[in-house]
Amino acid sequence: MTTSRPSRLGPGPSLRAVRGLLLACHPGPTVAVTVLVTALAVASGRDAAGCALVAAAVVAGQLSIGWCNDAVDAARDAAAGRTGKPVASGAVGVRAVWAAALAALALCVPLSLASGPAAGAVHLAGVAAAWAYDLGLKATALSWLPYAVGFGSLPGFVTLGLPGHPWPAWWAVAAGALLGCGAHLANVLPDIPADLAGGVRGWPQRLGTARVRLLIPLPLLAATTLLVLGPPEPPGAGGWAALAAAGAFTAGGLALGRGSSRVPFAAAIAVAAVDVTLLLARGTAITVP
């Protein structure tokens, strides 16, 4: 009688598929957005249960968006030779990714509505906008719109789940939308040549690599300006310092970015970090009085 032993050449098919599925969800953005929104919920005064619901709803929504994106782009990624994409490389099947995306979306609905009908509707509108991007808007001149709606909806999801269901301040929503536009530019920048070859002509692809490289920090700087000058109370020393820092990062990115592909991206990350810090520092102030 013989017994089988695990292969030493690599993980078995099932483990490879699980790893592929995890990578196909875009784990970096999924974790980053979930942590950001959960931290915003904590800063705004949501209780422990409310923060847990926010985290669960956001992670479910982000998982569904990431899996949908890789399932839709599977053929295009394979044609472009993107072997780092799990579906394109054959690590996991398209049907499995579609099934995971739909399951996560179905789970996102009750988790979002658990924060209240208004909060849930706002979050689901943002998730729906992201799915619209994956399913076709990414190849149009309106490719920025789902990012603006998705990120702009996040403050409302947090505040409308608070006692009394207060609306988010306009400047918090606008700053979130601008953060989304900056994220869109930064996310697409490395793939512009392959996207153009594959027939994808969204907003960044139409602008071209050189213009996008220089444009990335600008919507993020506009978000900084709103977060500092938007609230009714005058900005303190910290706010002015944050605005000055964001301006310096942006100026540096614009001045040095013509000869480098990394400097503008690094500048955008720095300005985005300033924006996130400001947004979290505002805490309960992001609601309408």
Image (cartoon, helix red, strand yellow):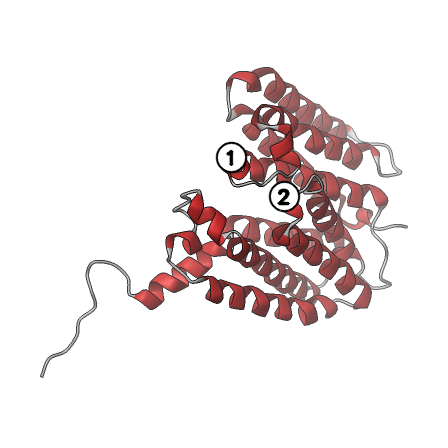
Q: Is residue 128 above or below residue 211?
A: below
Q: Quadrant of the N terminus?
A: bottom left
Q: Regarding mark 1 in the picture, which secondary structure is present there?
A: helix
> In the figure, is residue 80 to the left or right of 153?
left
How far apart are the alpha carbons under marks 2 and 1? 16 Å
Residue 36 appears at what percent x and percent y? Answer: 63, 49
| Residue furthest left as drawn | 1
- Mark 1: amino acid: Pro
Q: Residue at x 50, y 26 (%)?
A: 262
Q: Nearer the viewer, mark 2 or mark 1?
A: 2
- Observer-nearest of 12 and 115: 12
> In the figure, is residue 45 to the left or right of 209?
right
Residue 102 appears at what percent x and percent y? Answer: 58, 67
Name the mark on residue 165: none
Q: Is residue 177 above or below residue 16?
A: above
Location of residue 176 by image quarter: top right
- Observer-nearest of 28 and 280: 28
- Is there a contact, CB below 8 Å, between mark 2 and mark 1? no
Residue under label 1: 190
> In the figure, is residue 8 to the left or right of 34?
left
Residue 39 appears at what percent x and percent y? Answer: 65, 52
Residue under label 2: 139
Q: Residue at x 77, y 63 (%)?
A: 121
Judge whether residue 128 can be spotted in this image. Answer: yes
Q: Residue at x 48, y 53 (%)?
A: 74
- Mark 2: amino acid: Ala
Location of residue 189 by image quarter: top right
Residue 12 appears at what percent x and percent y? Answer: 28, 65
- Observer-nearest of 281 and 117: 117
